[in-house]
Image (spheres, helix red, strand yellow):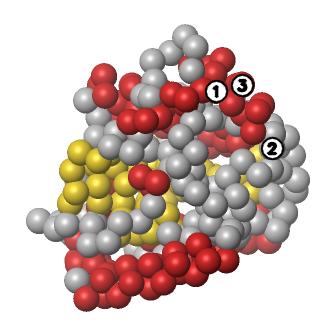
Amino acid sequence: MTADLFSGDAGDVTHPWRRLKRGLGEAAFDAISLTTLTGPRTDRLARTQPPLRVLVASVYRPGSLLAEALPRLRSERHEVTLALGAVERPEGPLAEHTVAEGLGGGKFENLNRVLAAALPPGGGSDPPPRGEFDWILAVDDDLLLPPRFLDRFVALCERFELDLAQPAQSLRSHSAWKVTRRRPASLARETRFVEIGPLTAFGRRAAAELLPFPELRYGWGLDLHWAAVAAERGWKLGVVDATPVRHESAIVGSAYPRADAEAEAADFLASREYLPASRAGEVTAVHRRAR
């Protein structure tokens, strides 16, 4: 089963020559975006987007980058609710949005605690229950985001009718899958697969079925299961290239034993449908224009 679960196809970006090469590629991609007016075109689309309700959920550790990312998770158009969890104690500008603290579980166990605090059962609550949000974003605390991120990202997800989506990652990011890396001259790609991080966006249909998360510590293989569910339900999955994020501070899986993560994934998927890792890189459509 292991060969079907883990592709190991992203490569090591810590090698100096590889980082230089990818840095040059990133500069070339930025030049293409400037030439094709990707930012202004996406901003025009965002200005026509009707207001939506968005929940941003994250768990942060001491010294995280989340405070720096916070302004770019706000919106000029949408009603955004921030629900944060602290591994230790609430800190700085994050404190006022922290709904849970002293979190000691894995990523998805911790996110479930945050979601439970932010989404109380029943109607008439403030913030609203899960079904009243148009998008729920699960965000890692070690991301750097581009300007006007949330408005641009949501507008493209809506324009291409995605149900489960993620922003592309910079070429220098520590990414586990090649398909999630930024592609030039593309606004968004429809894919068979969306990763468990570092930022995953759930539309209404996906959130209704996929949240709360299974009680997994590491979550490897969960995204392959999501892909199978999406194929069965007819959902659209996509990677948004026009809003690339930087996930460059730590190698994927460096903070915990890889063998434990693989064992958890194999056990989780043993009784569930999943997309083989060999198919995770498939792209079914490339969108270069918003209209």
The kind of residue tagged 2 is Tyr
User: Extreme left residue here?
Assistant: 291
Left or right: residue 104 compared with residue 135: right
Instruction: Identify residue for label 2.
Output: 256
The answer to whether residue 250 of the structure is visible from this angle is yes
Q: Quadrant of residue 229?
A: top left
Residue at 28% across / 66% down in the picture? 187
The answer to which of 108 and 277 lies nearer the viewer is: 277
Q: Earlier in the sequence, mark 2 or mark 3?
A: 2
Residue at 66% across / 17% down in the picture? 267
Residue at 32% across / 43% down in the picture? 282
The kind of residue tagged 1 is Ala
Q: Determine which of the numbered discs, if any, sits on residue 265 in the image.
A: 1
Question: Are dots 2 and 3 in contact, CB under 8 Å?
Answer: no
* Picture quarter with the N terminus: top right
Q: Position of residue 173 (x, y in %)?
A: 58, 66
Instruction: Work out how far the residue at label 1 is from the one at label 3, CA to CA, in angstroms.
Output: 5 Å
Q: Position of residue 211 (x, y in %)?
A: 52, 32
Determine the secondary structure under disc 1: helix
The kind of residue tagged 3 is Ala
Left or right: residue 152 compared with residue 129: left
Q: Quadrant of residue 184?
A: bottom left
The answer to whether residue 77 of the structure is visible from this angle is no
Q: Determine which of the numbered discs, if any, sits on residue 142 in the image.
A: none
Query: Is 114 located above or below residue 239 in the figure?
Result: above
Q: Residues within 10 Å of mark 1 (few under 14, many from 20)?
A: many
